[in-house]
Amino acid sequence: MVGDGDEKPRAIATNTSGGQKKKRTITIKVPHIFLGKKTSSDEKTVSKIKKTTFSPTVASIPLPIKPLKPPVSKNQDISKINRIKVSPILQKREDPVVITNKELKKSLGTERESRDLNYSSKLLKKFSLSRKSGIEEYNFEKHGSLVEAEVPAGYELIREYWADPGRALIYIALNTNSRMKEYLLYEPALSPFEYELLERLHEDLRDVLILTDDEVGMDRRFLLLTKMMDLLNYYGVTIGQRSLFKIEYFLVRNYIGWGRINALMNDPWIEDISCDGDNIPIFLFHRKEQNIKTNIQFETEALVSLAITLAQRSGKHISSANPMIDATLPEGSRLQLTFGTEVTSRGTSFTIRKFREQPFTPIDLMDLKTFSADMLAYFWLAIENNMSLVFIGGTASGKTTSLNAVSLFIPPLAKVISIEDTRELTLYHENWIASITRDSVGESGTSVDMFMLLKAAMRQRPEYILVGEVRGHEAQTLFQAMNTGHTTFSTMHAGSVDAAIHRLENEPLNVPRNMLQALNVLSIQKQIQIGPDRVRRSEEIVEIAGIDPATGNIMVNTVFEYDPLADSFGYTGRSQVLGDIATLQGWSREALLEEMERRKQVLNAIKDQDLRDYIRFTKIIQAYYIDKERVFDNINDLSRIAT
């Protein structure tokens, strides 16, 4: 036995008839497990809240303004709850073709193998077509900036940085009239001749961008610039290198990128992009500035065109007959789009929640102080021992980010099935089925919702089921999976544990109370303000301790709590989950604490050696499952394991 002790819980009961509240007291046994020296509440010291320190990664033009530094890479009194404490190509076309690996990677958009006997000759022909004269890659360090920007009248510059070095400059400026910060985007300015030439190229490229069999599979950007040079030669126009770089930028931006919002999509500081209608400035959620207005807006026709482009690139169709879609952009960002004035009176609107190509790992969340090392070691042990958990919180509180991060602790070879409306989860796990919902295709097509995917997952014998968010009747199937021995992770919108239980037991989720006992851990996520920064913290980690036999209420035990004054986390000293793990593994209290410390040591070593990308992190965690001693033999250089 790890340790035991008696705890008198606090009962929460409400008399629905309007009478006086009655309190009952029961006694349960919860193991005492201390992770370190226990300090009394009167010994706690209040430390000043430290602001996040950023270090520069983006280039800056020489202005006497300090540039931005990159981000670290971000009670409902319910009667049913008892809370307890527990390079360029200049050769002529007729020159011999010599292929290098670098050119192979650059000229072909995808690496393909073919059984076609003429595949090699066709490949050589592609390279001969790609060897055009006059194409030189723009380089900021070599060619300098293409942008000439000045702070407009009525604004005071606060900071500046590049979204695309040399070609897309961002000013964060204070509007002296409104006294509010604004996001000002500056791109290369075109002369009247350059503008006219760009318009002509736009029109003519539509005719020449019809690919032949030899051009299929070539890199899109390289092919576009090749066609552009063909047209310039056809026109007999000779322009300067600087003008050529400007035209290249706008062609790539409009044909391959996202048009006028391309710089926003490339800005690593932006989380959300929101367009509210015609001739209305675009608003952003900036990691440093929070909500901020931009100097970008669209006319009606341009906005409709952008909306159709966004929908088509997402594989969806939007029209007056189907004016609203939820979709995923090719790089993974989430898109919500409404068309025209059918459902939004101010015109076409869209919101893009940008996708992070490299997902946050537990190490990133340690740096951001969303979780402590103790909390992550707790999650690691719980996940290894098949404990189910749910992350709850409000919008943009970091629920899905935390779910993805802790899912990297899943043991290797375990079968994992993820179920989402829009693809957000990214794992480095081979035995993983990533499923997403689908709307019906045509009149006779069948829509596939989360409920159907969850039922299908149950027939595939998964060990871990990851559900992006529970919001409907699929919650019953999810908890049935928990009760039949499947380990499930999910997220849910709720402000507290009490509110989460209340939502689960009522419409439209309707989960029976006795099935809630299968849920082991709840993590409550919050987005809070610390000084000028908005940060995400885990407010508390709570365990479901069972049902009160006297009142039938759910009993919960708080394991970790957040102290907003010290901006730190405290361990309460008791954990039923850790006690159950110790019993299951046959560990003494000392053996359990030793294992917790070993895992904390591994996490801290990964952090100190800056092995934070999700692939290397996962390789180290998987190596720990396979051979712990090998990990500790290389604890001072874990990169040997992560390669």
Image (tube, grey):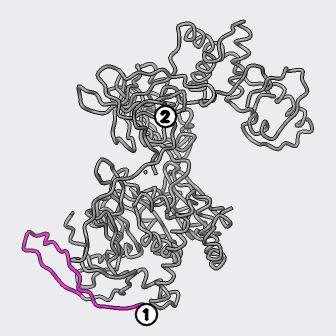
Q: Among all residues in the image, which is located at the extreme left?
A: 19
- Seen from the viewer's position, the closer of residues 240 and 257 is 240
Q: Residues within 10 Å of mark 1 (few under 14, many from 20)?
A: few
Q: Which residue is mark 1?
A: 1
Prevailing secondary structure of the magenta residues: loop
Q: Say above or below: 338 vs 8.
A: above
Q: Position of residue 376 (x, y in %)?
A: 46, 69
Rendered residue at 57%/30% (across/down): 257
Q: On screen, 233 above or below 640?
A: above
Tag count: 2
User: Can you say which quadrant of the picture contains the N terminus?
Assistant: bottom left
162 vs 340, left or right, is right
Q: What residue would you read off at disc 2?
A: 60
Which contiguous range is marked in magenta? 1-26
Q: Is residue 20 in the magenta section?
A: yes
Q: Secondary structure at mark 2?
A: loop
Let me know if residue 172 appears in the view. yes
